[in-house]
Amino acid sequence: MLKSYIKGVGHYVPENVVTNDDLAKLMTTNDEWITERTGIKERHHRKNRNDSEETTAYLGFRAAESALKMAGMTGKDIDYIVFATLSPDYFFPGCGVLLQEMLGCETVGALDVRNQCSGFVYAMSVANAFIKSGQYKNILVVGAEVHSFGLDFSDAGRGVSVIFGDGAGALILSATEDENAGDILATNMHSEGKHAEELCTKFPGSKFGWSDRMRLEPENVTDEEIYPVMNGNFVFKHAVTRFPETMMEALDKAGKTPEDLDMFIPHQANLRIAQFVQKRFGLPDEKVYNNIQRFGNTTAASIPLALSEAIENGKINRGDLVLLAAFGSGFTWGSVLFNY
């Protein structure tokens, strides 16, 4: 029976660190206010917001390089790419094709996944299905974001802009029949589109207008349309409901319990959400990995970034049972349970 085996992982963040005190120079806020509400102390932003080199695809490329090195592979060994992001280099084409060129892969398929904070668990679920079907043998799965160029760093945007960071994570999912190898045991994906505008960026798009609207009627384009907007309390209430649901769905499908877990990695949206879920499941600190304190919310990159770092730091070892879960804009949510 074919298994979906994680052969390598990697992550990358820009060198530039932005602390809460740095943000306090741009808007009316302070370290205590941000930390109390989000748990975030700092995040990484590309040094120049207008830098056309350190793009989302480039961050994904750097993370992918590390994953390939760990797996002992090159871009030529990859036969499919799944790239999760909400901040692509271009409106189109997607980042997957750009990464294919950067890595020197053959003319393999490249799929972009636009499911925001849930993007990486969706991407892993899709890749797992491809592997289990026998269609592909080595799939590169990437989550990467550059948020810093599209945030409102004024007082009007402080409730959202203090949260997000730039970064990338990647893994190689390979087919194997080795009975001793790890495997993805269960996945699930969900959505509820009626809440789309509770957490979204409205512009550009077919509903609120394309880029020509900025030129033709700039006086009618509002900050609420061009910057991310979030109904924080509403999102929080739904997140702390959906996280336990998707987690138990994966565990039940695999015949496992929370006590069986060696590590739980939640999407790094807000430390308070992660702590709520941890308490709900009675998980000890050593079985939950959070790095939002240092990286902020990197949406589709948050889970692979945390997974790669946890493995690098020896927090996850071969054979461990690991659960990934996410909730985000859409609303979308889902989870992946695997033996590493």
Image: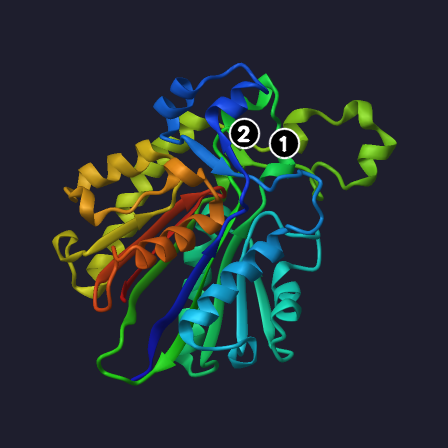
Residue farthest to the front, as pictured: 15
Residue farthest to the top, as pictured: 28
> Cβ–Cβ below 8 Å for labels 1 and 2?
yes
Mark 2 neighbour class, 10 Å CA radius: few under 14, some 14 to 19, many 20 or more? many
Q: Quadrant of the C terminus?
A: bottom left
Residue farthest to the right, as pictured: 216
Of the residues shown, which amino acid type is indicated by label 2? Ser
| Mark with earlier residue (1, 2) | 2
Q: Quadrant of the N terminus?
A: bottom left
Query: Residue 130 or 299: which is nearer the viewer?
Result: 299
Query: Residue 85 or 188: which is nearer the viewer?
Result: 85
Q: CA distance from mark 1 to mark 2?
A: 9 Å
Q: Residue at x 60, y 37 (%)?
A: 148
Q: Mark 2 = which residue?
A: 161
Q: Nearer the viewer, mark 1 or mark 2?
A: 2
Q: Residue 318: percent from the left, percent from the top?
A: 24, 68
In this image, 186 relative to 282: left or right?
right
Q: Residue 171: percent from the left, percent from the top?
A: 43, 65
Q: Residue at x 81, y 35 (%)?
A: 213
In this image, 188 relative to 115: left or right?
left
Of the residues shown, which amino acid type is indicated by label 1? Tyr
As drawn, the label of residue 136 is none
Mark 1 neighbour class, 10 Å CA radius: few under 14, some 14 to 19, many 20 or more? some
Q: Residue 2: percent from the left, percent from the top?
A: 33, 82
Q: Residue at x 55, y 58 (%)?
A: 60
- Quarter assignment of residue 180: bottom left
Q: Secondary structure at mark 1?
A: loop
Q: Mark 1 = which residue?
A: 227
Q: Secondary structure at mark 2?
A: helix
In this image, 126 relative to 93: left or right?
left
